[in-house]
Amino acid sequence: MLKVLLVDDEPLSIEGLKAIVNWHKIGYEICGESLNGEDAINKIEKFKPDLVVTDIRMPVLDGLGLISHVKNKIDESIKFIILSGYIEFEYAKKAMEYGVKHYLLKPVFEEELESALMEIYDDIQGEKKKEIFNTEESYTLISNMIKKVTQKDGSIEELTGFYNTVFQKNMAKEWCYVLFRILPFENINDDKNEKQSLDKLTENIKSEAKKTLKSNNHIFINNHDANIFGLLIGFSKHNKNHNDVEKTLYSIIQRVKTNKSNKYQIAVGEFINDLEEIRKSYDTSLKALEHCFYEDLNSIIYYDSIKNKKVNYTFDDSEFVNLVIEAIEEIDEERAKSILHKGFLYFKKKLLDR
């Protein structure tokens, strides 16, 4: 439903407008009424209507003054229908300069008003579809630029310039690069079915990312490998902790958890204040991902929490190796698994490099 505000200094005229057409049937809902232009401005700022139907002559602020204020100071995309008791060429000419297409004479007939409303409805829906298309197209272009930059095959200047142009009114103030690894699917025995499952999961994750386009945060996603996704997350405010990151990732994690056999590892790179430092955040997310070996599955690893941890490169346990070989020679699968699991836990505890 599109929202419409009715403005007229005569209450009976407003009642007539409400009754003359079936607003809901043609896709509108009346969000408010005003008896003058000044009050209408307050209602427009509060309700954010798609359309305003207004009388031309009113006390305090007339229809043209209202249109001028809204177009210049509130939202130029709001549509208007002007109502007038008589033809005034100068008023009509001025209205056209503001982009108003419909100037109707009172008394307004049902067919005439309904025709104008349906035309405006189609115009608004067309503009919204175009806006969505342009936004998604820009999202794809920026995502492709990000991938090239992280692979040292793209221009940071081109990326930042295009991003600033597209999101000039809603730019992020802080960023971090995230690597999201999906571990091999359990209970899927052939490569074809696993690829189909990964492709479906990819689309789900991209769908969640695109939902952020009109929010305060931005997520741009790329495939770095068959099962590794790169997410560049931009935040509208500076983060003092990891809460906002975890909240943003939660919706994506839910997509992964729709299949209970899915396991994942998430590595978060260093936070940056400027998009130009994207490679720094990407490189540190790689280091965090390497450290995932030592952490539990289905967890989030932050570079900040592991950057000072030292890895031990010394491992000399011939007895462990001999036990594994012995279990294999005896074809004792359960024993081999048990020995390897204990060894794995030892590696994790001692931060041994594999």
Image: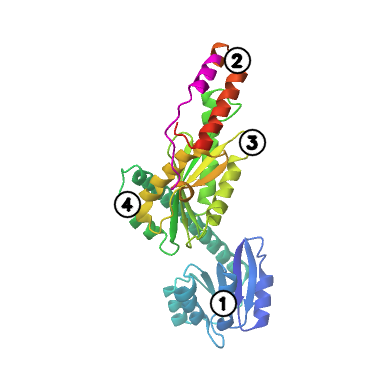
In magenta stretch: residue 315: yes
Residue pointed to by mark 1: 54
The label nearer to you, 3 versus 1, is 3
The amino acid at mark 4 is: Ile
Q: Is residue 236 left or right of residue 161?
A: right
Q: Residue furthest bottom?
A: 59
Q: Magenta segment range? A: 308-326
Q: Secondary structure at mark 3?
A: loop
Badge nearest the viewer, 1 or 2: 2
Residue bearing the label numbered 3: 260
Q: Nearer the viewer, residue 244 or 291?
A: 291
**Above or below, comparing residue 81 to residue 62 in the picture:** above
Q: Residue at x 59, y 73 (%)?
A: 46
Label 2 amino acid? Asp
Q: Which residue is label 4 attached to?
A: 156
Height in image: 323 above or below 293? Answer: above
